[in-house]
Image (cartoon, grey):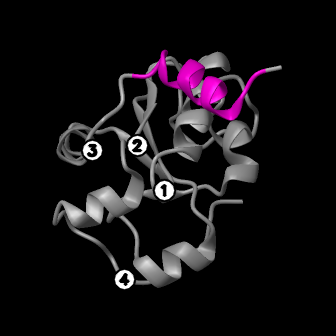
């Protein structure tokens, strides 16, 4: 049996996690910032401007390079930074995306809250998720 800590450590062992400043740089270079947080969190705390909202339940279908339901422009070479509240669920999600062929997937260390605490731009409100 794997522990939760073990599962998280395994997931993070494949990721080149981005701190908030690096995530902002990656976004400026064209990386896709993918917000997997529930609507309630986005509405209460805001969103990263330019991010794409894909709730966790749809993530693999929207970002797997071979999925017929993937977002336009997503390929195996897409750089994607997955964002959750504090950087735990996003690590697991990014590792899943890597296993599905999105080899440049990673996550935001510390999550959205680290981004906001770093003083990076935040857009108010909660936008609708891509279905």
Mark 4 to mark 2 CA distance (whole Å): 19 Å
- Whether residue 127 is visible, yes or no, is no
Q: Can you tell which quarter of the image residue 25 is in?
A: top left
Q: Mark 3 near mark 2, Cβ–Cβ under 8 Å?
A: no
Mark closest to the chain's N terminus, 2 or 1: 2
Mark drawn on residue 27: 3
Mark 3 to mark 1 CA distance (whole Å): 11 Å
In the image, the segment drawn in magenta is 2-15
Mark closest to the chain's N terminus, 3 or 1: 3
Q: Residues within 10 Å of mark 4 (few under 14, many from 20)?
A: some
Report which residue position mark 4 lands on. Answer: 124
Queried whether the magenta region covers residue 14, the answer comes back as yes
**Secondary structure category for the residue under label 3:** helix
Residues 54 and 109: in front is 109
Mark closest to the chain's N terminus, 4 or 2: 2
Report which residue position mark 1 lands on. Answer: 52
- At x 24%, y 48%, the residue is 20
Mark closest to the chain's N terminus, 3 or 4: 3
Looking at the image, the residue that sits furthest to the right is 1
Q: 107 left or right of 101?
A: left
Q: How crowded is mark 2: few (under 14 residues within 10 Å), some or many (20 or more)?
A: many
Q: 130 left or right of 17?
A: right
- At x 20%, y 38%, the residue is 22
Mark 3 to mark 2 CA distance (whole Å): 6 Å
Mark 3 to mark 4 CA distance (whole Å): 19 Å
């Amino acid at each position: 049996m794997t522990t939760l800590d073990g599962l998280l450590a395994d997931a993070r062992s494949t990721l080149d996690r981005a701190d908030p400043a690096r995530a902002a740089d990656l976004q400026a270079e064209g990386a896709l910032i993918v917000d997997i947080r529930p609507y309630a969190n986005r509405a209460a705390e805001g969103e990263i401007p330019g991010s794409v909202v894909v709730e966790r339940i749809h993530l693999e279908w929207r970002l797997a390079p071979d999925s017929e339901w993937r977002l336009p422009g997503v390929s195996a070479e897409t750089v994607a930074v997955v964002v959750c509240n504090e950087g735990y669920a996003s690590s697991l999600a990014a590792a899943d995306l890597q296993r599905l062929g999105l080899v440049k997937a990673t996550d935001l260390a510390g999550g959205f809250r680290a981004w906001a605490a770093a003083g990076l731009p935040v857009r108010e409100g909660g936008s609708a998720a891509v279905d």
